[in-house]
Image (cartoon, rainbow, N blue to C red):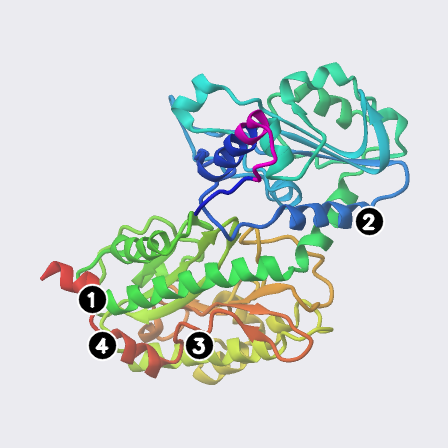
Amino acid sequence: MFLILPKALTKNVRAFLFSSVLLILFTPFRAGAQNSYDIDLLTKEFHSGRRDALRKLMDDSSVAVFFSATIKNRSNDVDYEFHQDPNFYYLTGLNEENALLLVFKNDVQIGSAAANEFLFLEDRDPKTERWTGKKMGIDGAKTILGIQNAFSSSSFADFKIDLSRFKKVYCLKENETQLFTGFLSTILSLTTLDSYATKEMTAKLRELKTKEELDLMRKAISITCDGIKEAMKALEPGMYEYNAEAIGEYVFKSKGAEDVGYPSIVGGGENSCILHYETNRKKLSAKDMLVCDIGAEYHGYSADVTRTFPVSGKFSDEQKTIYNIVLEAQQAGIAKCRAGEDFRAPHKEATAIIQKRLLELGIIKQPNEVNKYFFHGTSHYLGLDVHDVGIYGKLKPNSVITVEPGIYIPFGSDCDEKWWNIGIRIEDDVLITETEPDVLSSCVPKTTEEIEALMKQESLFNLMKK
C-alpha cells in the first residue's frame, strides 16, 4: 500500500496527516480494544445508524444511558479476557471498559458542546499500553468510531450532567460500572427511570439483523460447521470429550474466530442427557453417542449449532430410531419458521412429533410424559448473545432463531433399558425471510446416512497421531 499526499500541502500538514494515517493503519490495539487488523468489522456508519434508530423509539425529552462492561477478575492478578456489553458494542463499536454513552432524543448543551450523543472513554496511557496494548483514546473515537463528542472518562464529573430535567431516563439497572458508580446511583434514584422500556427498545432493534450483521453471523456459523465436521471425522473410541472439543475450537481459531460464543457442550454416553454439560472430561467408548453443541464467536456475533453422532461411526438401531425422531421433529419445527408465525410455533410442532413417536415406541404411556425426555424450549434468538434479545412475539424477517429439539433418556428411566443413556439434540440456526426459512447451518450434515459417510473420511488430526 502506498500513501500519496498532495504536494500543495505544507510540510507540517503533510507530516501530521501522514503520521495520523499511519497511526490508524498500523497501531495495534489490545484484545479488549478496537483492533486495526480486521477489515470486516461493523462500520462506524452501522453503529451511528443504530443510535439513530434508537432515538426514533425514544420519547421526547429523554436520554438513554449505556455503560460499558467492566473487567472481571478470574483469580489473584489474572483477569478474564474482556468482553464488551452487547448493547454498548451495538451502539458504539467500542470494545473497551470504563466507558459511558449518552444518547439524547434531541440536541442538548453539555459543557461547551451541543449534540445528541456523548461518549466518555479512557485516555490513552503509554505506560499502561506497554502492558496491555493500545487503546482507542478520544482522537480514535472521533476518527474510527465517528463519535465527535468524545471526552475523557476521568473528566466526566466536571460536566455536572443533571438527568432530573428529562422526562424519561432509559438505563438498564443491572449494568455494572466502576468509574461511574455515583452517576449510576443517581440514575437508579430517579422516578423517571424506565429500565423496562430500555430492554424493550434494545430488544426490538437487535432482534432484526441488518445485512452487515448477517454477513458476520454467516461467517461465525460457517466456521462452526467446519469445526463440527472436523470433529465428526476425527472421532473414534478411546478419545476424550475434550479431544472433540479441542478439535472444534482449534478450527474456530484457525479460521479467525476470536472466541467461543459460550462454553462448548461436548457430552458422550450418560453426559449426552445433560442439557448444559460443560465438564467434557469423559473417555468415550464405541457404544456412546456424542452431543456436540458448539458455537464460534466472530466479531461479537455467535453461532449455535448442535449435531449428535456415534463415537463408533455407525448408529445402532436404537440410536438411529431416536435420532430420526428428533430429526423429524426438527424439520417440522424449521418448516414453521416463517414470518407471521408465533415464536413458539416451531416448539409446538416439534413437541407434537416427539410426543407421538415416543407414545408409539412405548417410551411414554401418556402424552404429558413427553416432558420427561424433552424438557427445554426449541428456539431462541441468536446474535450478539447466544441467547439473544428479542420480543418473542410473531416471527419477523431478518431475525435469526435456533431450532433445537432433543430427546434425553438417562440411565434408570421408566422405559426399556435399551433406550437408556441415549441423548440426542439437533440444532440449526435459521434466518426468517419473507418466504422460505433459510437454514444458515445447513453446511454440516445431519441425516444418519450423511453423518456415517462423513465419519468414514480421514481427519488431519488422526493423521497427526500416526
Q: Are marks 4 and 2 in contact (CB under 8 Å)?
A: no
Tag of residue 236: 1
**Front in this rendered view, residue 6 or 276:** 6
Q: Are marks 2 and 1 in contact (CB under 8 Å)?
A: no
Distance from the alpha carbon under mark 4 to that under mark 2: 54 Å
Q: Are marks 4 and 1 in contact (CB under 8 Å)?
A: no
Distance from the alpha carbon under mark 2 to that under mark 1: 54 Å
Mark 4, Cα crowd under 10 Å, few <14 / some 14-19 / many 20+, is some
Q: Residue at x 57, y 25 (%)?
A: 12
Which quarter of the figure has residue 366? Answer: bottom right
Whole-percent x and y of residue 82?
Answer: 48, 35
Distance from the alpha carbon under mark 1 to that under mark 3: 30 Å
Q: Are marks 3 and 2 in contact (CB under 8 Å)?
A: no
**Which residue is identified by label 4?**
456
Q: Earlier in the sequence, mark 1 or mark 3?
A: 1
Element at label 2: helix
For discs 1 and 3, the disc positioned in front in the rendered view: 1
For discs 4 and 3, the disc positioned in front in the rendered view: 4
